[in-house]
Structures are given as structure tokens and as C-alpha cells.
Image: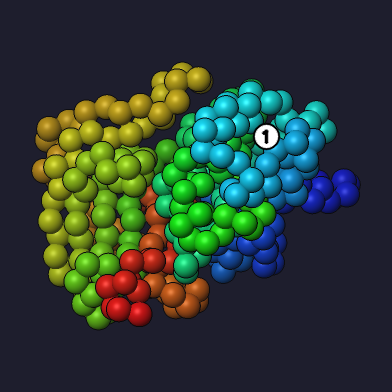
Amino acid sequence: MDGGRAPDPRVVWLHHGETDRALVGGKGASLNRLSVLGAPVPPAFALTTHAYHAFAGLHGLPRRASDVADRELTNLRARIEALPLPPDLRDAVCREFAVCRDGSEAVAVRSSATAEDSAEFSFAGLHDTILDVRDETSLERAITRCWASLWSDRAVTYRRAGGIAADESAIAVVVQRLIRSDVSFVVFTEDPVSGRDGHLVIAATYGLGEAIVSGLVVPDHIVIGPDGGVIEYAIGEKHLMVIPGAMPGDGIREVPVPRAMRSVPALTEAQAIEAATIARALAGRFGYPADIEGAFAGRELFLLQIRPITTLGSRAGV
């Protein structure tokens, strides 16, 4: 962000023009495009695949899934997580970390693999996300943990099953200002189950979205009709919520939702319509049915991720 410094190809902000998936991974490229389209995205920067390649080359890490045996994966991940960032990269990352926080307490650190969130491969849940990162040491460890997750057993198996085991493996890391959300939601711009034309489906719950994406709760289930109005609202149990820790270093924690709130809609009708309206418009701009994660902090809406709904093709038989 400092115009007085030459651009560092290892660290880029996700708000300038089109950014190549090969540089910032699927998640990073989608966030960058959201920002360019004017969507309400929290500030974010990425450690590019150049950063990972330099780190991997420095330490002699394998380049392809076909280059490493299953029995070696656990030790490989532990080794990556324990290694320090090169000093100049650590300095660059810490500078941008301070800018990204800009008075907020924490960031989310998300893996962003180059094949991730594509029409062919989702990799959903296979690479790590670390929430509520508040200091430079925790940031460094979160970055190496994301890099190590490229070599998780499930991620390597997924690459092999998809026929990309012989491709050079690379991963970027997205560092995004953490939104202390009152309510989190996921919008599916096409119904991934029933396939009803023109219908959107929203899952919503209290706190951070980890409770939804990890299946920790039964969220509220909202259906938006073709005219943009709410036609169904089924209240989920929402017995717990995920929130940032009370102190630095605590990380996220699960706490019970007060009983009186469990039977109350997490989203107002106006909020559900607002989320659906922006999601429908963005899916049209992206050109595919989308799964969009977002949050409300007070009355303000934020979008955190967007990816193709990869299950539609199998449902439709295409």
C-alpha cells in the first residue's frame, strides 16, 4: 500500500484490477474480483504463490503430490509449520498486517490453493483457515500452517483423485480483516438440493461463520423466491456460536447461545433480502451459481468468500 516501495511479487493487496488465480489462488482471485466489483469486502492481502515457491525452494520441499509418499506427509507438515519465514518476507508481511488491521483487533488467515474454488474442484475444507490472529508471531505460524495444509492427507488424496498429482503444487495465503459478526450466513444463489429455478437458499446463525461451514449447528434455513422476497423461514436450533476469544492468543471459542435467542430468527427479513439481492447480482457478474459467505456486524453487511456451487453439475447430470 506504500507507493514509496517497489512492489513485492510475494505480497499483493486484493483490490487492484484482475489478479491471476495462479498468483493468489482461487479464494484470493475471487475476493479480488469481489472488491473490484465494489462488493463490501473487508480489506485483504495475499502472500502469493511466489512466496510459497521461494519458501519451498529454500527448504527443499516437494513440488508435486506424486513426489511424496503418504507415510511422509505428517513429518512434512510438521516441518513446514516449524520453519520460520525468511526475514525479509516476515518484515513485508508484518507491515501489511498492521495496515490490514487498522485499529481492528484481528485478522483471518485463509489458505488459497490455485485449483481451489474452481468449477472443477472445490477443495472446500481441505486447507486450513485460522481465525482471530492478533499478533505477528501468531500470523507467522498461521501462514506456515496454511502452507502445510497443502500437504494434508485429504488434500493430497483429492489432488491425486482429480488427476492433478503430477502438477506442481502451489498455495497462496489470504490475510483478511476479521469481522466480529453478530450473524453469519451462506447464500446459495441456486438451490443445491431441490434445484427450483430462481430460488436462493440462505443458512444463517449467530457469531462467526465457522459454526455453519463446520456443521456445528443447525442454522436457520431461508428460501428467497424469484421475486426477491422471503417465502420460507425455518428457524434452526443454533445452540452454540463461535466467537473470537476474550484475550489475544485465545483463538476462537464455542459458547452457548442464550435459550431465548435460539428460537428467534438470526436474520431479519430485510437482512435476508439484502443478502440475497447482492448475492444474485454478483452471481450474474461472476457468471456461475455461487456459494457466498457473509456476515452482518450491526447493520453493516460484509462478504467474505465466493465460490462456484460444484454440486449442481452432478445433480443436473452434466
Report whether 46 appears left or right of 107: right
Q: In which quadrant will I find the C terminus? A: bottom left
> Colour scheme used in the picture?
rainbow
Picture coordinates of residue 156 (x, y %)? 51, 47
Give residue 167's quadrant in the image.
bottom right
In the image shown, does 268 or 212 lie closer to the viewer?
212
Q: Residue at x 58, y 65 (%)?
A: 33
Q: Nearer the viewer, residue 267 or 28?
A: 28
Residue at image point 26% right, 55% down: 203
Q: Give the SS element for disc 1.
A: helix
Residue 2 shows up from this direction: yes
Viewer-closest of 228 and 238: 238
Residue 221: % across, % down: 19, 57
Residue tagged by mark 1? 98
Going by the image, does 315 lie left or right of 16?
A: left
In the image, is residue 105 above or below residue 26?
A: above
Query: What residue sits 21% from the left and 48% below the top?
Result: 219
